[in-house]
Amino acid sequence: MNLVPLIDVLLILLIFFIVTFSMAQRENDLNISVPAADSGAPKDRQVGEIVVNIARDGGLKVNTQELNEEQLGQRFRDIFALNPKQAIIIRADEETVYKKMFRVLDLCYQAGLYHVSFASRSPVPGPPP
């Protein structure tokens, strides 16, 4: 029995799953430090969640694609046309101007998307006061 074709298929499947897993993590911009909250804890990610990253300087990214406000509004309208109950997660840097976060939230509401949440992290335990 020739095992070479079987090994080839297994390696292709392994590569496929590795690439798929890395793509699922790409929407989280690593240069963004989300604010800490006592209730902030990592939650199980749902398939199909849209993550909007807001950088410290106010730059907007969706799935590693840089967008301006007009493009983001159009993207939200397109998403609403496909799925009105689409979940949106806003990941804003803790140094981001509040006005920019509020503008993204307003674009969600203008498009009709109401399932919006903000990302946070667990606070780092420090020395007791």
Image (cartoon, rainbow, N blue to C red):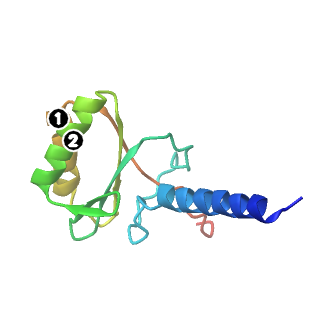
**Residue sitting farthest toward the front:** 1
Which mark is on residue 30? none
Q: Which residue is drawn at 31% across and 29% down?
A: 83
The C terminus lies in quadrant: bottom right
* Among the two numbered marks 1 and 2 on one chain, the one whose residue lies closer to the N terminus: 2
Confirm or deny contact between disc 1 and disc 2 (CB under 8 A).
Answer: yes
Q: How far from the left and from the top, in percent, is residue 106? A: 16, 41
Q: Could you tell whether 121 is left or right of 32 in the image?
A: right
Residue 123 visible in this rendered orientation of the protein? no
Give the farthest residue toward the left: 70
From the viewer's perspective, is 67 left or right of 23? left
In the image, residue 47 lies at what x, y percent?
A: 49, 40
Q: Is 7 positioned to the left or the right of 85 in the image?
A: right
Which amino acid lies under the numbered mark 2 shown in the image of this protein? Answer: Phe
SS label for mark 2: helix
Q: In the displayed structure, would residue 83 be above or below residue 129?
A: above
Q: Which residue is drawn at 38% across and 67% down?
A: 32
Residue occupied by mark 2? 76
What amino acid is labelled 1 in the image? Answer: Ala
Q: Marks 1 and 2, Cα distance to the nearest angstrom?
A: 6 Å
| Residue at image point 60% right, 68% down | 126
